Image: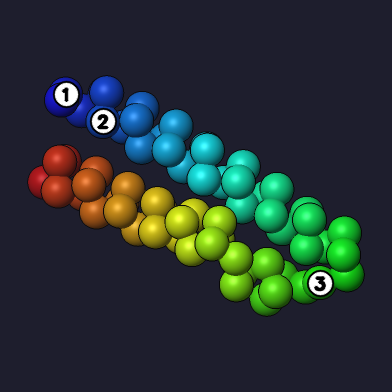
Amino acid sequence: MNTQTLILTVLIFWLIMGLAFLSAYSEVKRTGGTLVDAMRNNESFFFIISIVVGLVVVAFKLA
């Protein structure tokens, strides 16, 4: 997989995970919760993991 494809794949993955987190966050806010309550969802876990994994993959690919 070349660098451009890898970066595009990571960015699309971040976009999907970010949208899932924003959806969960808006649902929590609508029901009167806080950001801390939203961070306890599976979506936030996957969003944070996607950021960490994406940065690690890109760092090793570019190094």
Q: Secondary structure at mark 2?
A: helix
Q: CA distance from mark 1 to mark 3?
A: 43 Å
Circle 3 packing at 10 Å, graded few (<14), some (14-19), many (20+), is: few
The image shows residue 53 at horizontal and vertical percentages of 30, 53
Q: Quadrant of the N terminus?
A: top left
Do labels 1 and 3 touch, CB within 8 Å? Answer: no
Q: Which mark is residue 40?
A: none
Do labels 2 and 1 touch, CB within 8 Å? Answer: yes
Q: Which mark is residue 6?
A: 2
Answer with mark 2 or mark 3, whichever residue precedes in sequence: 2
Residue at x 26%, y 30% (from the top left corner): 6
Tell me the quarter of the picture where residue 62 sits.
top left
* Residue 60 versus residue 12 in the image, above or below: below
Q: Amino acid at mark 1?
A: Asn
Residue closest to the eye, 26 or 4? 26
* Residue 34 versus residue 29 in the image, above or below: below
Q: Amino acid at mark 2?
A: Leu
Q: CA distance from mark 2 to mark 3?
A: 36 Å
Residue closest to the eye, 1 or 61? 1
Tag 3 residue:
33
Residue at x 52%, y 38% (from the top left corner): 16
Tag 1 residue:
2
Residue that lies at the very extreme toward the bottom in this rendered image: 36
44 sits to left or right of 30: left
Residue at x 82%, y 62% (from the top left corner): 29
Residue that lies at the very extreme toward the left in this rendered image: 63
Answer with mark 1 or mark 3, whichever residue precedes in sequence: 1
Q: Secondary structure at mark 3?
A: loop
The image shows residue 18 at horizontal and vertical percentages of 57, 46
Indicate which label's residue lies in the foreground, 2 or 3.
Answer: 3
Circle 1 packing at 10 Å, graded few (<14), some (14-19), many (20+), is: few
